Amino acid sequence: MLSSAAMSNAQVLTVPPEPQASADGIGNNDRAVHGGPELSIIVPTFNECGNVVELTNRIRDHLRDVSWEMIYVDDDSPDRTANLVRELAASDFRIRCIQRIGRRGLSSACIEGMLSSSAPYLAVIDGDLQHDERLLAQMLAELKTGTLDIVVGSRYSDGGGIGDWDAGRARMSRVAGRLSRTLVPDGLRDPMSGFFMLRRSAFDGALRNLSAIGWKILADLFASSQPPLRFKELPYEFRPRHAGDSKLDSLTLWAYAMLLVDKTIGHIVPVRFVAFSVVGAIGVGVHFAVLTLLFRFAKTPFVQSQAIATVVTMSFNFVLNNVLTYRDERLRGLQWLRGWLSFNLACGIGAAMNVGLATYLWQLSGKWYLAATAGIAAGAVWNYAVTKRLTWHDPSA
Ligand code: GDD
Ligand code: MN
Protein backbone atom coordinates (compact mmCIF):
# COMPACT_ATOMS: atom_id res chain seq x y z
CA MET A 1 0.00 0.00 0.00
CA LEU A 2 1.44 3.38 -0.96
CA SER A 3 1.51 6.09 1.70
CA SER A 4 -0.41 9.26 0.84
CA ALA A 5 2.87 11.16 0.40
CA ALA A 6 4.09 8.52 -1.99
CA MET A 7 0.73 8.60 -3.73
CA SER A 8 0.92 12.32 -4.35
CA ASN A 9 4.50 11.92 -5.52
CA ALA A 10 3.41 9.15 -7.83
CA GLN A 11 0.69 11.40 -9.17
CA VAL A 12 3.16 14.18 -9.78
CA LEU A 13 5.44 11.75 -11.57
CA THR A 14 2.73 10.29 -13.75
CA VAL A 15 1.07 13.53 -14.84
CA PRO A 16 1.29 13.31 -18.62
CA PRO A 17 2.89 16.17 -20.50
CA GLU A 18 0.60 18.88 -21.89
CA PRO A 19 -1.06 17.42 -24.93
CA GLN A 20 -0.20 19.16 -28.15
CA ALA A 21 -2.54 19.35 -31.05
CA SER A 22 -1.56 17.22 -34.00
CA ALA A 23 -2.94 16.32 -37.39
CA ASP A 24 -4.69 13.19 -36.13
CA GLY A 25 -6.20 15.03 -33.20
CA ILE A 26 -4.28 12.96 -30.61
CA GLY A 27 -1.73 14.75 -28.47
CA ASN A 28 1.66 13.63 -29.83
CA ASN A 29 3.22 13.31 -26.43
CA ASP A 30 0.42 11.09 -25.21
CA ARG A 31 1.62 8.35 -27.49
CA ALA A 32 4.75 7.93 -25.46
CA VAL A 33 2.77 7.35 -22.26
CA HIS A 34 1.29 3.90 -21.78
CA GLY A 35 0.74 1.55 -18.90
CA GLY A 36 3.05 -1.32 -18.05
CA PRO A 37 2.31 -4.79 -19.39
CA GLU A 38 0.06 -7.27 -17.64
CA LEU A 39 2.42 -10.20 -18.13
CA SER A 40 6.22 -10.39 -18.02
CA ILE A 41 7.75 -13.43 -19.67
CA ILE A 42 11.21 -14.10 -18.27
CA VAL A 43 13.56 -16.07 -20.50
CA PRO A 44 16.91 -17.14 -19.06
CA THR A 45 19.46 -17.62 -21.82
CA PHE A 46 22.95 -18.89 -22.28
CA ASN A 47 24.05 -19.36 -25.89
CA GLU A 48 20.58 -19.33 -27.41
CA CYS A 49 21.29 -17.31 -30.56
CA GLY A 50 19.61 -19.90 -32.74
CA ASN A 51 16.38 -19.77 -30.72
CA VAL A 52 15.47 -16.31 -29.49
CA VAL A 53 14.09 -14.99 -32.79
CA GLU A 54 11.82 -18.00 -33.23
CA LEU A 55 10.67 -17.89 -29.60
CA THR A 56 9.91 -14.18 -29.81
CA ASN A 57 7.91 -14.67 -33.00
CA ARG A 58 5.90 -17.48 -31.51
CA ILE A 59 5.08 -15.44 -28.41
CA ARG A 60 4.00 -12.54 -30.63
CA ASP A 61 1.73 -14.85 -32.59
CA HIS A 62 0.32 -16.63 -29.60
CA LEU A 63 -0.33 -13.74 -27.23
CA ARG A 64 -2.10 -11.33 -29.53
CA ASP A 65 -4.77 -10.45 -26.97
CA VAL A 66 -2.48 -10.02 -23.99
CA SER A 67 -0.39 -7.04 -22.97
CA TRP A 68 3.00 -8.67 -22.45
CA GLU A 69 6.73 -8.04 -22.37
CA MET A 70 9.64 -10.44 -22.73
CA ILE A 71 12.66 -10.08 -20.49
CA TYR A 72 15.65 -12.04 -21.67
CA VAL A 73 18.24 -12.53 -18.91
CA ASP A 74 21.51 -13.47 -20.52
CA ASP A 75 24.72 -14.40 -18.73
CA ASP A 76 27.03 -12.79 -21.26
CA SER A 77 26.75 -15.66 -23.74
CA PRO A 78 29.81 -16.04 -25.98
CA ASP A 79 27.47 -16.45 -28.98
CA ARG A 80 26.28 -12.87 -28.30
CA THR A 81 22.66 -13.77 -27.59
CA ALA A 82 22.33 -10.45 -25.73
CA ASN A 83 23.24 -8.45 -28.84
CA LEU A 84 20.67 -10.32 -30.86
CA VAL A 85 17.99 -9.67 -28.22
CA ARG A 86 18.84 -5.96 -28.25
CA GLU A 87 18.41 -5.98 -32.02
CA LEU A 88 14.94 -7.48 -31.55
CA ALA A 89 14.22 -4.91 -28.84
CA ALA A 90 15.17 -2.05 -31.15
CA SER A 91 12.07 -2.74 -33.24
CA ASP A 92 9.72 -3.88 -30.45
CA PHE A 93 9.53 -2.06 -27.12
CA ARG A 94 8.01 -5.14 -25.45
CA ILE A 95 11.35 -6.90 -25.58
CA ARG A 96 14.13 -6.23 -23.09
CA CYS A 97 17.51 -7.65 -22.28
CA ILE A 98 19.33 -7.93 -18.98
CA GLN A 99 22.95 -8.87 -19.55
CA ARG A 100 24.85 -10.14 -16.50
CA ILE A 101 28.63 -10.10 -16.52
CA GLY A 102 30.77 -12.63 -14.63
CA ARG A 103 27.70 -14.47 -13.36
CA ARG A 104 26.05 -17.80 -14.10
CA GLY A 105 22.90 -19.44 -12.85
CA LEU A 106 19.46 -20.21 -14.16
CA SER A 107 17.58 -19.52 -10.90
CA SER A 108 19.25 -16.23 -10.11
CA ALA A 109 18.73 -15.11 -13.73
CA CYS A 110 14.98 -15.79 -13.42
CA ILE A 111 14.78 -13.97 -10.10
CA GLU A 112 16.57 -10.91 -11.42
CA GLY A 113 14.31 -10.91 -14.47
CA MET A 114 11.23 -10.97 -12.25
CA LEU A 115 12.66 -8.22 -10.05
CA SER A 116 13.09 -5.99 -13.08
CA SER A 117 9.40 -6.28 -13.95
CA SER A 118 6.38 -4.42 -12.62
CA ALA A 119 3.74 -6.68 -14.17
CA PRO A 120 1.15 -8.37 -11.95
CA TYR A 121 1.79 -11.74 -13.63
CA LEU A 122 5.21 -13.32 -14.16
CA ALA A 123 6.06 -16.28 -16.37
CA VAL A 124 9.32 -18.20 -16.77
CA ILE A 125 10.03 -20.14 -19.95
CA ASP A 126 13.20 -21.68 -21.39
CA GLY A 127 14.74 -20.02 -24.42
CA ASP A 128 15.18 -23.20 -26.47
CA LEU A 129 11.50 -23.85 -27.32
CA GLN A 130 11.32 -27.04 -25.27
CA HIS A 131 8.46 -25.54 -23.26
CA ASP A 132 5.15 -25.13 -25.07
CA GLU A 133 4.50 -21.39 -25.31
CA ARG A 134 0.89 -22.08 -26.33
CA LEU A 135 0.18 -22.82 -22.67
CA LEU A 136 0.84 -19.23 -21.61
CA ALA A 137 -2.61 -17.82 -22.41
CA GLN A 138 -4.29 -20.63 -20.50
CA MET A 139 -1.93 -20.15 -17.54
CA LEU A 140 -2.88 -16.48 -17.43
CA ALA A 141 -6.59 -17.27 -17.59
CA GLU A 142 -6.21 -19.77 -14.72
CA LEU A 143 -4.39 -17.24 -12.55
CA LYS A 144 -7.02 -14.60 -13.25
CA THR A 145 -9.72 -16.77 -11.70
CA GLY A 146 -8.16 -15.53 -8.45
CA THR A 147 -8.00 -18.87 -6.64
CA LEU A 148 -4.41 -19.75 -7.58
CA ASP A 149 -0.93 -18.38 -6.88
CA ILE A 150 0.97 -20.35 -9.50
CA VAL A 151 0.31 -22.45 -12.59
CA VAL A 152 2.94 -25.00 -13.55
CA GLY A 153 3.59 -26.48 -16.98
CA SER A 154 3.80 -30.16 -16.16
CA ARG A 155 5.36 -33.08 -17.99
CA TYR A 156 4.10 -35.62 -15.50
CA SER A 157 0.40 -34.71 -15.40
CA ASP A 158 -2.00 -36.75 -17.50
CA GLY A 159 -1.61 -35.62 -21.09
CA GLY A 160 1.95 -34.37 -20.56
CA GLY A 161 5.19 -36.03 -21.59
CA ILE A 162 8.96 -35.87 -21.45
CA GLY A 163 9.46 -36.08 -25.22
CA ASP A 164 12.70 -37.48 -26.55
CA TRP A 165 14.64 -37.84 -23.27
CA ASP A 166 16.81 -40.94 -23.01
CA ALA A 167 16.31 -43.35 -20.10
CA GLY A 168 19.22 -41.87 -18.10
CA ARG A 169 17.95 -38.27 -18.23
CA ALA A 170 14.40 -39.42 -17.45
CA ARG A 171 15.64 -41.32 -14.39
CA MET A 172 17.68 -38.35 -13.21
CA SER A 173 14.62 -36.08 -13.44
CA ARG A 174 12.49 -38.55 -11.46
CA VAL A 175 15.15 -39.03 -8.74
CA ALA A 176 15.60 -35.25 -8.44
CA GLY A 177 11.82 -34.89 -8.16
CA ARG A 178 11.67 -37.48 -5.39
CA LEU A 179 14.50 -35.78 -3.47
CA SER A 180 12.55 -32.54 -3.49
CA ARG A 181 9.52 -34.14 -1.84
CA THR A 182 10.22 -32.66 1.57
CA LEU A 183 10.33 -29.18 0.07
CA VAL A 184 7.34 -29.09 -2.23
CA PRO A 185 3.67 -29.86 -1.57
CA ASP A 186 2.29 -33.36 -1.99
CA GLY A 187 0.49 -33.63 -5.24
CA LEU A 188 2.84 -31.44 -7.25
CA ARG A 189 3.80 -33.83 -10.01
CA ASP A 190 6.51 -31.87 -11.80
CA PRO A 191 8.52 -29.97 -9.16
CA MET A 192 11.52 -29.97 -11.54
CA SER A 193 9.65 -27.99 -14.17
CA GLY A 194 11.22 -24.74 -15.31
CA PHE A 195 8.00 -23.53 -16.95
CA PHE A 196 5.40 -21.68 -14.87
CA MET A 197 3.46 -18.48 -14.26
CA LEU A 198 2.74 -16.86 -10.91
CA ARG A 199 1.17 -13.74 -9.51
CA ARG A 200 3.50 -11.05 -8.27
CA SER A 201 2.24 -11.28 -4.69
CA ALA A 202 3.33 -14.94 -4.60
CA PHE A 203 6.80 -14.00 -5.84
CA ASP A 204 7.07 -11.14 -3.34
CA GLY A 205 6.09 -13.47 -0.51
CA ALA A 206 8.87 -15.95 -1.32
CA LEU A 207 11.52 -13.49 -2.45
CA ARG A 208 13.53 -13.05 0.74
CA ASN A 209 13.65 -16.78 1.45
CA LEU A 210 14.80 -17.85 -2.00
CA SER A 211 18.12 -19.69 -2.18
CA ALA A 212 18.68 -18.68 -5.83
CA ILE A 213 21.13 -21.56 -6.20
CA GLY A 214 21.43 -23.64 -9.36
CA TRP A 215 18.59 -24.42 -11.73
CA LYS A 216 15.53 -25.40 -9.77
CA ILE A 217 13.76 -22.09 -9.34
CA LEU A 218 10.29 -23.67 -9.13
CA ALA A 219 11.19 -26.01 -6.25
CA ASP A 220 12.94 -23.06 -4.59
CA LEU A 221 9.77 -20.94 -4.90
CA PHE A 222 7.56 -23.63 -3.42
CA ALA A 223 9.98 -24.29 -0.56
CA SER A 224 10.32 -20.57 0.19
CA SER A 225 6.62 -19.70 0.35
CA GLN A 226 4.64 -19.31 3.51
CA PRO A 227 1.67 -19.85 3.37
CA PRO A 228 2.06 -22.64 0.79
CA LEU A 229 1.38 -21.68 -2.81
CA ARG A 230 -2.01 -22.60 -4.25
CA PHE A 231 -1.08 -24.33 -7.48
CA LYS A 232 -2.42 -26.05 -10.55
CA GLU A 233 -0.54 -28.06 -13.16
CA LEU A 234 -1.28 -27.92 -16.87
CA PRO A 235 0.07 -30.80 -18.95
CA TYR A 236 2.34 -30.26 -21.93
CA GLU A 237 4.73 -32.33 -23.99
CA PHE A 238 8.41 -31.41 -23.48
CA ARG A 239 9.70 -30.74 -27.00
CA PRO A 240 13.13 -31.43 -28.47
CA ARG A 241 15.54 -28.51 -28.29
CA HIS A 242 15.07 -26.20 -31.31
CA ALA A 243 18.78 -25.31 -31.84
CA GLY A 244 22.02 -25.44 -29.87
CA ASP A 245 22.99 -27.62 -26.91
CA SER A 246 21.71 -28.20 -23.39
CA LYS A 247 23.71 -26.57 -20.60
CA LEU A 248 22.96 -29.41 -18.22
CA ASP A 249 26.08 -31.16 -16.92
CA SER A 250 27.11 -33.18 -13.89
CA LEU A 251 27.65 -29.99 -11.90
CA THR A 252 23.95 -29.22 -12.23
CA LEU A 253 23.43 -32.15 -9.86
CA TRP A 254 25.87 -30.66 -7.37
CA ALA A 255 24.04 -27.31 -7.55
CA TYR A 256 20.82 -29.18 -6.86
CA ALA A 257 22.39 -30.82 -3.79
CA MET A 258 23.44 -27.35 -2.61
CA LEU A 259 19.87 -26.12 -3.01
CA LEU A 260 18.53 -29.06 -0.97
CA VAL A 261 21.10 -28.50 1.79
CA ASP A 262 20.38 -24.76 1.85
CA LYS A 263 16.65 -25.35 2.13
CA THR A 264 17.18 -27.89 4.94
CA ILE A 265 19.88 -26.31 7.15
CA GLY A 266 20.66 -23.04 5.37
CA HIS A 267 19.06 -21.00 8.18
CA ILE A 268 21.63 -22.44 10.61
CA VAL A 269 24.80 -22.57 8.53
CA PRO A 270 25.46 -21.04 5.08
CA VAL A 271 25.41 -23.70 2.38
CA ARG A 272 28.59 -22.31 0.84
CA PHE A 273 30.35 -22.98 4.14
CA VAL A 274 29.12 -26.58 4.02
CA ALA A 275 30.48 -26.93 0.48
CA PHE A 276 33.72 -25.23 1.48
CA SER A 277 34.12 -27.70 4.38
CA VAL A 278 33.42 -30.70 2.14
CA VAL A 279 36.16 -29.48 -0.20
CA GLY A 280 38.47 -28.93 2.79
CA ALA A 281 37.86 -32.48 4.00
CA ILE A 282 38.75 -33.88 0.56
CA GLY A 283 41.82 -31.60 0.70
CA VAL A 284 43.02 -33.35 3.85
CA GLY A 285 43.09 -36.60 1.85
CA VAL A 286 45.05 -34.90 -0.93
CA HIS A 287 47.53 -33.51 1.60
CA PHE A 288 48.25 -36.92 3.09
CA ALA A 289 48.53 -38.54 -0.35
CA VAL A 290 51.15 -35.98 -1.48
CA LEU A 291 52.96 -36.13 1.83
CA THR A 292 53.13 -39.92 1.76
CA LEU A 293 54.39 -39.88 -1.80
CA LEU A 294 57.15 -37.36 -1.12
CA PHE A 295 58.21 -38.25 2.40
CA ARG A 296 57.73 -42.01 2.53
CA PHE A 297 58.46 -43.00 -1.04
CA ALA A 298 60.64 -40.24 -2.53
CA LYS A 299 62.51 -39.78 0.77
CA THR A 300 62.17 -35.97 0.58
CA PRO A 301 62.93 -34.27 3.93
CA PHE A 302 59.79 -33.84 6.05
CA VAL A 303 59.71 -30.04 6.11
CA GLN A 304 60.01 -29.82 2.32
CA SER A 305 57.43 -32.59 1.81
CA GLN A 306 55.02 -30.87 4.15
CA ALA A 307 55.52 -27.48 2.46
CA ILE A 308 54.92 -28.91 -1.02
CA ALA A 309 51.89 -30.89 0.19
CA THR A 310 50.47 -27.68 1.69
CA VAL A 311 50.77 -25.69 -1.55
CA VAL A 312 49.38 -28.55 -3.64
CA THR A 313 46.45 -28.92 -1.26
CA MET A 314 45.70 -25.19 -1.21
CA SER A 315 45.74 -25.11 -5.01
CA PHE A 316 43.52 -28.17 -5.16
CA ASN A 317 41.08 -26.60 -2.70
CA PHE A 318 41.07 -23.37 -4.69
CA VAL A 319 40.30 -25.13 -7.97
CA LEU A 320 37.54 -27.23 -6.43
CA ASN A 321 35.95 -24.33 -4.56
CA ASN A 322 36.04 -22.25 -7.72
CA VAL A 323 34.13 -24.93 -9.61
CA LEU A 324 31.82 -26.20 -6.86
CA THR A 325 31.32 -23.66 -4.08
CA TYR A 326 31.45 -20.56 -6.27
CA ARG A 327 30.27 -22.05 -9.53
CA ASP A 328 27.98 -19.08 -10.17
CA GLU A 329 30.82 -16.57 -9.69
CA ARG A 330 33.60 -18.71 -11.13
CA LEU A 331 36.93 -16.94 -11.73
CA ARG A 332 38.62 -17.26 -15.09
CA GLY A 333 41.79 -16.07 -16.82
CA LEU A 334 43.74 -13.35 -15.02
CA GLN A 335 41.13 -13.21 -12.26
CA TRP A 336 41.74 -16.90 -11.70
CA LEU A 337 45.45 -16.27 -11.13
CA ARG A 338 44.75 -13.38 -8.78
CA GLY A 339 42.21 -15.57 -6.99
CA TRP A 340 44.73 -18.40 -6.57
CA LEU A 341 47.25 -15.99 -5.05
CA SER A 342 44.79 -14.44 -2.61
CA PHE A 343 43.45 -17.88 -1.68
CA ASN A 344 46.93 -19.16 -0.84
CA LEU A 345 47.68 -16.02 1.14
CA ALA A 346 44.47 -16.22 3.18
CA CYS A 347 44.74 -19.96 3.79
CA GLY A 348 48.42 -19.58 4.73
CA ILE A 349 47.38 -17.24 7.53
CA GLY A 350 44.54 -19.64 8.38
CA ALA A 351 47.04 -22.49 8.72
CA ALA A 352 49.25 -20.41 11.02
CA MET A 353 46.20 -19.61 13.15
CA ASN A 354 45.23 -23.26 13.20
CA VAL A 355 48.66 -24.38 14.44
CA GLY A 356 48.95 -21.46 16.89
CA LEU A 357 45.56 -22.01 18.50
CA ALA A 358 45.95 -25.80 18.62
CA THR A 359 49.37 -25.53 20.26
CA TYR A 360 48.07 -23.06 22.82
CA LEU A 361 45.02 -25.21 23.68
CA TRP A 362 47.13 -28.34 23.82
CA GLN A 363 49.52 -26.75 26.30
CA LEU A 364 46.54 -25.50 28.28
CA SER A 365 44.45 -28.67 28.39
CA GLY A 366 46.74 -31.51 27.34
CA LYS A 367 43.87 -32.86 25.17
CA TRP A 368 45.49 -33.09 21.76
CA TYR A 369 42.42 -34.15 19.77
CA LEU A 370 40.31 -31.30 21.21
CA ALA A 371 43.10 -28.81 20.57
CA ALA A 372 43.50 -30.05 16.98
CA THR A 373 39.74 -29.93 16.30
CA ALA A 374 39.50 -26.37 17.61
CA GLY A 375 42.48 -25.36 15.47
CA ILE A 376 40.95 -26.89 12.35
CA ALA A 377 37.55 -25.29 13.02
CA ALA A 378 39.05 -21.83 13.58
CA GLY A 379 41.20 -22.19 10.44
CA ALA A 380 38.21 -23.31 8.37
CA VAL A 381 36.00 -20.40 9.49
CA TRP A 382 38.82 -17.93 8.84
CA ASN A 383 39.59 -19.40 5.41
CA TYR A 384 35.93 -19.35 4.43
CA ALA A 385 35.18 -15.85 5.70
CA VAL A 386 38.29 -14.28 4.18
CA THR A 387 38.41 -16.03 0.79
CA LYS A 388 34.70 -15.43 0.28
CA ARG A 389 35.35 -11.69 0.15
CA LEU A 390 38.99 -11.51 -0.89
CA THR A 391 39.03 -14.23 -3.54
CA TRP A 392 35.44 -14.44 -4.81
CA HIS A 393 34.24 -10.95 -3.87
CA ASP A 394 30.99 -12.42 -2.59
CA PRO A 395 29.20 -9.82 -0.43
CA SER A 396 26.42 -12.12 0.89
CA ALA A 397 26.35 -13.15 4.52
N1 GDD B 1 20.92 -16.81 -17.79
C1 GDD B 1 21.25 -18.12 -17.79
N2 GDD B 1 22.34 -18.52 -17.07
N3 GDD B 1 20.51 -18.99 -18.48
C2 GDD B 1 20.86 -20.29 -18.47
C3 GDD B 1 21.97 -20.78 -17.75
C4 GDD B 1 22.75 -19.83 -17.02
O1 GDD B 1 23.74 -20.14 -16.37
N4 GDD B 1 22.05 -22.12 -17.94
C5 GDD B 1 21.02 -22.44 -18.75
N5 GDD B 1 20.31 -21.34 -19.08
C6 GDD B 1 19.11 -21.25 -19.92
C7 GDD B 1 19.24 -21.90 -21.28
O2 GDD B 1 19.77 -21.04 -22.24
C8 GDD B 1 17.80 -22.29 -21.57
O3 GDD B 1 17.07 -21.22 -22.09
C9 GDD B 1 17.24 -22.63 -20.20
O4 GDD B 1 18.07 -21.95 -19.26
C10 GDD B 1 17.25 -24.14 -19.91
O5 GDD B 1 18.54 -24.65 -20.11
P1 GDD B 1 18.81 -26.00 -20.94
O6 GDD B 1 20.26 -26.15 -21.10
O7 GDD B 1 17.97 -26.02 -22.16
O8 GDD B 1 18.30 -27.05 -19.86
P2 GDD B 1 17.48 -28.39 -20.00
O9 GDD B 1 16.65 -28.43 -21.24
O10 GDD B 1 18.41 -29.50 -19.82
O11 GDD B 1 16.54 -28.28 -18.70
C11 GDD B 1 15.49 -27.38 -18.64
O12 GDD B 1 14.27 -28.02 -18.67
C12 GDD B 1 13.92 -28.72 -17.51
C13 GDD B 1 12.56 -29.29 -17.68
O13 GDD B 1 11.59 -28.32 -17.79
C14 GDD B 1 15.59 -26.48 -17.43
O14 GDD B 1 14.67 -25.40 -17.54
C15 GDD B 1 15.25 -27.17 -16.18
O15 GDD B 1 15.23 -26.24 -15.11
C16 GDD B 1 13.94 -27.82 -16.33
O16 GDD B 1 13.65 -28.58 -15.21
MN1 MN C 1 16.43 -27.15 -22.74
Image (cartoon, rainbow, N blue to C red):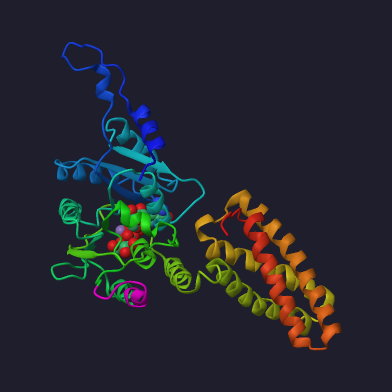
- Left/right placement of residue 320 relative to residue 216 reads right
Q: Is residue 250 visible?
A: yes
Residue shown at the point (20%, 11%) measured from the top left:
22
The residue lying toward the viewer, choosing from 184 and 12, is 12
Q: Position of residue 396 (x, y in %)?
A: 56, 57
Looking at the rendering, which quadrant does residue 35 occupy?
A: top left
Q: Quadrant of the C terminus?
A: bottom right
Q: Is residue 179 magenta?
A: yes
* Image region (quadrant) for ligand 2: bottom left
- Left/right placement of residue 145 relative to residue 347 reads left
Q: Position of residue 304 (x, y in %)?
A: 82, 73
Q: Is residue 245 visible?
A: no
**What span is in magenta?**
176-187
Q: Is residue 244 magenta?
A: no
Looking at the rendering, which quadrant does residue 177 occupy?
A: bottom left
Q: Position of residue 143 (x, y in %)?
A: 20, 55
- Left/right placement of residue 252 relative to residue 26 reads right
Establish if 333 lies above or below 6.
Answer: below
Residue shown at the point (25%, 53%) measured from the top left:
129
Establish if 215 lies above or below 73.
Answer: below
Establish if 30 lies above or below 241.
Answer: above
In the image as oriented, which residue stretches furthest toward the bottom? 367
